[in-house]
Amino acid sequence: MAEATVVSTLTENPSAEPSVRDFLALLKPRVMSLVVFSGAAGLFVAPGSIHPVLAAVAILCIAIGAGASGAINMWYDADIDAAMTRTAKRPIPSGLIDPSTALSFGCVLAAGSVALMGVAVNWAAAAILAITIGFYVFIYTMWLKRSTPQNIVIGGAAGAFPPMIGWAAVTGDLAIGSAVLSLIIFFWTPPHFWALALYRANDYAAAGVPMLPVVAGRAETRKQILIYSLILAPIGVLPSFVGVSSAAYGGFAALLGLLFFVMSFQLFRSDDDRDAKRLFGFSILYLFLLFGGLIADHALMAA
């Protein structure tokens, strides 16, 4: 991590004291919300039961672990963040938080979230949480992000683990149902981030990040988005076939998958940044609706 990159910014504002809001920004709350929601979905639909207090602790640990990953990511990527207009105002490049403080903050949260999960819930869930944090920090942030246009594809595995963590918090192990939920996120991640990368390609190029539009071009990126959206559509329906949900959820998921594909096809044909932005926005809504529908379906089945 090029810590020296942000030293000049810090020295320009030496009297600045980080606020609670600055530390919260380190946790990447928008990303955290998706992680927490998918983790909660895994916990909710897992077979068996868990005490409500322990369920809340498990979700809290997932949130803290996700935030810890975000803080360490911001520490390591401070040089990239400083070069991109989208991220230049984050706490470290803007000089609000010292890089070493951010690193310490992230490490303490990471260790604390894993320890609390293990002691309060179970060590299977804690182990998967630790693997998730480690994969995001060491495999994605420190290795893949700067070295390959497939960074999002392989690194997306880290974002796919939370449903498994939630599931293991209830059952103490893993099963095909939890794997299917993670598979949904794994195939959702590339089109989601590539849509963003299409209209932020200049930012990524300036920062030297080899995102697919920068390396392979816009046409290839649009084609890959279309391919992944085509794969994602049937995978979103899979919970209905492995006993996790009913046919009603399957129909709802199929409709969402069709909408995702139609928007991807529109982007494939148009090469318009407005379509890329629309797909990016819808992809977030898609995941919330899909897992929200899964939770609602499970609640109705249990009633």
Image (cartoon, rainbow, N blue to C red):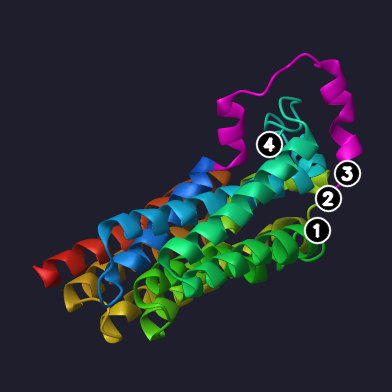
Return the residue at label 4.
87
Q: Residue furthest front?
A: 119
Secondary-structure class at tag 3 = loop
Residues under labels 1 and 4: Cα distance?
Answer: 16 Å
Q: Which mark is first along the chain, 3 or 1?
A: 3
Residue holding disc 1: 146
Residue depicted at 91% across the width and 36% down the height? 4
Q: Amino acid at mark 4?
A: Thr
Mark nearer the viewer, 1 or 2: 1
Residue underneath mark 2: 208
Q: Mark 4 against mark 2, which lies toward the viewer?
A: 4
Tell me: 62 left or right of 97: left
Q: Are marks 4 and 3 in contact (CB under 8 Å)?
A: no
Residue contact between numbered discs 1 and 2, judged by CB atoms under 8 Å: yes
Depth check: give the residue in front, 222 or 167. 167
Query: Residue most toward the top?
Result: 15
* Mark 4: secondary structure: loop
Cα distance in 3D space between marks 1 and 2: 8 Å
Which residue has dot 3 on it? 2
At label 3, which amino acid type do we have?
Answer: Ala
**Secondary-structure class at tag 1:** loop
Question: In the rendering, at what x and y percent does residue 152 appear?
Answer: 65, 64
Q: Residues within 10 Å of mark 3 (few under 14, many from 20)?
A: few
